[in-house]
């Protein structure tokens, strides 16, 4: 019984702290006034019985009315508790649990209830979409893992033949490609450290140098206060940005290309900035990219992606942005800065405390 009384006290406490208290507090005051009236009637009857006045007409009616009144008051209190106090305390609990902002406290009970249900419906839809995206990613990873060891072993065999035939560049390319393949396809690690991401970006650039025969330099600046060997991020968030810079930012006649990777910490965030010295983008393209980045992580998959002059769609960039938002929250993600002819800069913002 003590647990039940404790629960009742907690519910009344939440009710008094809620926005519904001002709306409904007059009801218990009225019930209390009725209690006082019925108690006064019983006291009056008892007093008149004692002094012997109106003994024939008074007792039965007053007693009946008083008892019925008290019972009705108790029933009214119970109904008030179950249909007002309990629901309002539950709504207050849900608001606090999910940190819901439901506007001003001037709204009525049912308006607030409907608004709460609407917000929870959106949260449930987002959670469902998040799980759906995760399942789709798992299925995609499974499709990409069809007998991966066969591919690993084949690449190692080819590298061995390259070594026998005295082809060191070919052997080095195959070794790096094998490492990239293992890193990308492996499902054991969906989250990796920043240092691991930087390392795989470095190897990707080496492969691109071999492939397109252009000197690509990556300048790495990691500030001392960034826990790059302990901070975990979604896998493959740097490589697609660097790939985008090489494919769409590098001039056709380029002999050298520079990518600057600067990782630093602010008071509340870790910032990863990937800057190139390429052709840059138009203001309209940058605006459309950022509009997509600022949208929901669970935006409509049928939304038309941004296209670049070289045929890119920005799907890989949007994928990075969505995965960051799903992992850390809607306030984090990807943002683009660029001026045509002056290169592009993509900024990844992450929470400093995670």
Image (cartoon, rainbow, N blue to C red):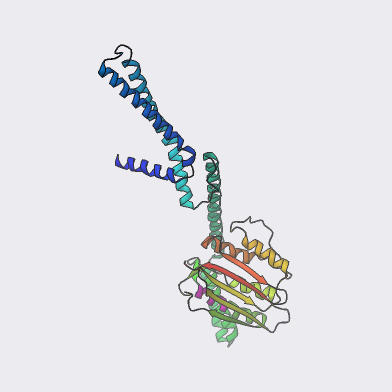
- Residue closer to the observer: 37 or 280: 37
Residue 201 sits inside the magenta stretch: yes
Mark yes or no: residue 38 visible: yes
Query: Residue 258, image x and y in percent?
Result: 64, 81
Name the residue nearer the viewer: 102 or 277: 102
Magenta span contains residue 2? no
Rendering quarter of residue 273: bottom right
Please identify the quarter of the rendering in which residue 71 is found: top left
Q: Is residue 178 visible?
A: no
* Above/below status of 23 relative to 262: above
Q: Position of residue 27 (x, y in %)?
A: 45, 34
Which residue occupies 59% across, 64% down?
A: 321
Give the quarter of the figure containing the N terminus.
top left
Residue 248 position, x and y percent, is 69, 73
Q: Between residue 60 and residue 172, name the one nearer to us.
A: 60
Is 300 displayed left or right of 97 in the figure?
right
Look at the picture and state if 158 lies above or below 323: below
The overriding secondary structure of the stretch rendered in magenta is helix
Give the residue drawn at x 55%, y 71%.
271
Task: Looking at this view, name the residue that lies furthest to the top.
Answer: 56
On the image, the x and y values in percent for residue 110 come to 53, 39
In the image, is 115 to the left or to the right of 79? right
Residue at x-position 46% and y-position 51%: 97
Question: In the rendered image of this protein, does residue 53 appear above or below residue 217?
Answer: above
- Range drawn in magenta: 194-203
Most extreme residue toward the bottom, as rendered?
166
Q: Is residue 117 above or below residue 325?
A: above
| Location of residue 78 by image quarter | top left
Q: How many marks?
A: 0
Q: Is residue 257 left or right of residue 69?
A: right
């Amino acid at each position: 019984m003590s647990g039940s009384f404790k629960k009742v006290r907690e519910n009344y406490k939440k009710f008094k702290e809620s926005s519904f208290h001002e709306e409904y507090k007059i009801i218990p005051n009225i019930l209390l006034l009725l209690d006082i009236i019925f108690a006064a009637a019983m006291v009056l009857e008892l007093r008149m019985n004692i002094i012997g006045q109106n003994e024939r007409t008074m007792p039965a009616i007053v007693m009946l009315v008083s008892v019925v009144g008290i019972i009705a008051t108790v029933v009214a209190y119970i109904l008030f508790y179950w249909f007002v106090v309990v629901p309002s305390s539950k709504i207050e609990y849900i608001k606090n649990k999910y940190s819901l902002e439901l506007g001003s406290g001037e709204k009525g009970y049912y308006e607030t209830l409907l608004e709460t249900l609407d917000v929870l419906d959106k949260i449930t839809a987002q959670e469902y979409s998040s799980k759906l995206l995760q399942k789709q990613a798992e299925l995609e990873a499974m499709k990409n893992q069809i007998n991966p060891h066969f591919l690993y072993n084949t690449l190692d065999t080819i590298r061995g033949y390259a070594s026998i035939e005295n082809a060191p560049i070919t052997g080095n390319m195959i070794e790096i490609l094998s490492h990239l393949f293992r890193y990308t396809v492996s499902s054991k690690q969906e989250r990796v450290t920043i240092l691991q991401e930087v390392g795989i970006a470095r190897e990707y650039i080496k492969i691109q140098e071999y492939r397109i025969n252009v000197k690509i330099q990556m300048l790495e600046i990691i500030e001392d206060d960034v826990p790059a060997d302990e901070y975990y991020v979604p896998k493959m968030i740097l490589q697609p940005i660097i790939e985008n810079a090489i494919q769409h930012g590098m001039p056709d006649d380029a002999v050298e290309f520079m990518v600057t990777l600067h990782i630093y910490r602010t008071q509340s965030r870790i910032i990863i900035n990937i800057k190139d010295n390429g052709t840059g983008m138009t203001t309209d393209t940058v605006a459309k990219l950022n509009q997509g980045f600022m949208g929901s992580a669970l935006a409509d998959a049928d939304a038309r992606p941004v296209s670049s002059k070289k045929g890119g769609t920005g799907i890989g960039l949007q994928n990075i942005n969505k995965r960051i938002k799903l992992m850390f929250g809607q306030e984090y993600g990807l943002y683009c800065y660029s001026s045509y002819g002056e290169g592009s800069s993509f900024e990844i913002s992450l929470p400093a405390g995670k």
